[in-house]
Image (cartoon, rainbow, N blue to C red):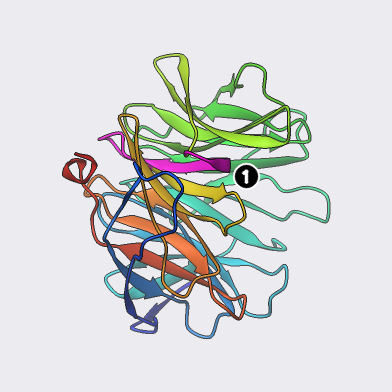
Amino acid sequence: MRFAHKFGFTLVLLFCVPLILAQSNVKVAHLTVTRIDVPGSSDTNLSGINNNGVIVGSFDFIRGPDWHSFTWSNDAFNYFDVPNALFTIARGINDTDQIVGYYGLNNSESPGFIYDGQAFITVQYPGATSTTPDAINNVGLVVGYWFPVVEGFRFNGSQFRLIVVPGSLLTMPRGVNNLQDVVGTAEVPGNTYEGFLYSGGKFKILNFPGATSTVPSGINDSRIVVGAYIPNNAPQACFFWKNGKFMTCKVPGANMSSCSGISNAGVIVGSYEDSYYFWHGFTTSPITDADFQ
């Protein structure tokens, strides 16, 4: 299924507001936030953006399992589903509009897919019950993770290679840039989730100061990383990282928020939950290297 709907989104301008932080050295990013909702949906999630400004995400109408996917560009939604799937969740997009995600085959299997706007190619790690491709770069390198073991992978279109953080209980790659840097999160003993950057064959741990969990989800070619963190006794919020420096912001009125992707221009996409527990997609004004100075 594929069709377009133009000018149907909800657009509200908001501004990131400061969080109460125990870490005074963490700066607050002052960004403009634009809300984007699929018309008539109960929940909208934005999960990726390419360097042409095309956004990919998913939505549902009835707070149930029947999720559908879309791209958003030039104020228009284009909807698509894997044929006969129980649900379709789009996760990432590259500059040639190749989209990755996963879909429900039945109640126990969820293969991944690559979609070029015309046809779907199934991506399934050998022996996996579920495969979750989360991002794709411009040479078609896909990163994600598979179940039931929950290990990370890179997939070049024909071959899988594992990405596993040493000593972790599980590894979930979430983003990749055109330099083949990979970001994601790993569970370590103690029920803690640590963020990581995998570059040049080496892992670097990214932990937001004072957070119980850090989940990087996107990285651009300037190596600005975006994601979410959970502080002690506070709701989940967005973070931004570059060269060892963290920044944060909170969408006003949000119970919690998560940033999931960033373009080379510094435009960020993500989602937030409102006080009625509905989810909305959003984009931000650009964040740049200068913001981390």
**Of all residues shown, which one is farthest toward the top?**
201
Above-or-below relation of 286 to 45: above
User: Which image quadrant: the C terminus?
Assistant: top left
State the extent of the magenta-drawn residues as a range: 209-225
Q: Is residue 223 magenta?
A: yes
Q: Quadrant of residue 107?
A: bottom right
* 38 with respect to 13 (left or right): right
Image point 50% across, 66% down: which residue?
A: 272
Q: Nearer the viewer, residue 190 or 170?
A: 190
Q: Which percent across, then down, holds residue 139?
A: 36, 32
Q: Residues within 10 Å of mark 1 (few under 14, many from 20)?
A: many
Visible residue check, residue 150:
yes
Secondary structure of the residue carrying tag 1 is strand
Residue 21, position as x, y percentages in the image: 44, 52
Relative vertical location of residue 91 with respect to residue 88 in this rendering, above or below:
above
Left or right, 211 with reference to 204: right
Q: Where does the N terminus fall, quadrant-wise?
A: bottom right
Q: Is residue 177 magenta?
A: no
Identified by mark 1, the residue type is Gly
Q: Is residue 196 left or right of residue 130?
A: left
The residue tagged 1 is: 112
Would residue 115 be visible to someone looking at this image?
A: no
Looking at the image, residue 254 lies above or below residue 153: below
Residue at 62% in and 36% down: 193
Q: x%, y% of residue 36?
A: 40, 74
The image position of residue 226, as x and y in percent, is 40, 45
